[in-house]
Amino acid sequence: EVQLVESGGGLVQPGGSLRLSCVVSGFTFSKYWMHWVRQAPGKGLVWVSRMNSDGRTTNYADSVKGRFTISRDNAKNTLYLQMSSLTAEDTAVYYCAREGYYDSWSDLYYDAYDIWGQGTMVTVSS
Amino acid sequence: EIVMTQSPATLSVSPGESATLSCRASQSVSSNLAWYQQKPGQAPRLLMYTASSRATGIPARFSASGSGTEFTLTISGLQSADFAIYYCQQYNSWPYTFGQGTKVEIK
């Protein structure tokens, strides 16, 4: 079964740090770009960061650039998000997502997010 | 950054009726558009990709169309499982961006 399982969320004080993990199973992790997407309470989906399959390319939303670091360990089938200098605006459910829906009819991959984890809640509050 | 605008924000529909959701891009995204469904307390689920193709396991009552800047998702014969929030997302230009969502609620 293809699965993404996030962990590491919790309550942290403003200015604090947290590391999220996303353990994947059921597919070849090292072949896919992976993303972090967050959702503040009652709000919509916002992309946070992405990393390519071999870990050499990363991108960040402006709102987290310089504070968050995405990484991956392909041997451990795990994606990470190291978050620091957290503020209340970072309070959200954080999802990891796989990019790359495979269409068997066309034998092509599309950059939609076809697999999502269940999310982990990060609350930044004093 | 491409801005995705969805309308309406909320759509009230009776079970069995159809719902039509709109998504507009601030510049052309070709057909590089996806639709997601999200139910309370759950992760989003991919419904449609490349603007009009259903993802694996998505019922035929879901259909979508559009290209360029104007896109539509139609749900025919709404069932109780379909009441949720729907997001569009463009993956034509980096950063990939989502619309703000349309909530489909029971009338």
Image (tube, coloured by chain):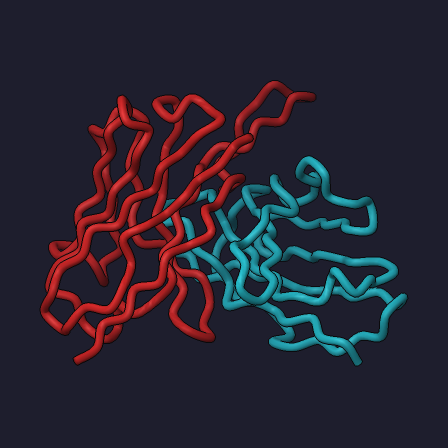
Q: How far across and down, in percent of the image, does residue B32 sit?
A: 54, 42
Quarter of the image for the N terminus of chain A: give it.
Answer: top right
B14 sits to left or right of A28:
right
Quarter of the image for the C terminus of chain A: give it.
Answer: bottom left
Q: How many marks?
A: 0
Q: How far across and down, in percent of the image, does residue A6 sit?
A: 37, 47
Residue in the picture at 27% in, 63% down: A10
Chain with red colouring: A
**Farthest residue toward the top?**
A107
Would you place residue B48 above or below residue A99 in this image?
Answer: below
Q: How far across and down, in percent of the image, does residue A106 sit?
A: 65, 21
A1 sits to left or right of A81:
right
Q: How far across and down, in percent of the image, does residue A93 sit?
A: 38, 62
B11 sits to left or right of A101:
right
Residue in the picture at 39% in, 22% down: A31
A79 sits to left or right of A65:
right
Residue in the picture at 72% in, 38% down: B57
Front one among A94 and B19: A94
**Colour displayed for chain B in the image of the structure:** cyan
Front one among B67 and B51: B51
Front one among B23 and A49: A49
Residue A98's quadrant in the figure?
top left
Residue in the picture at 45% in, 47% down: A117
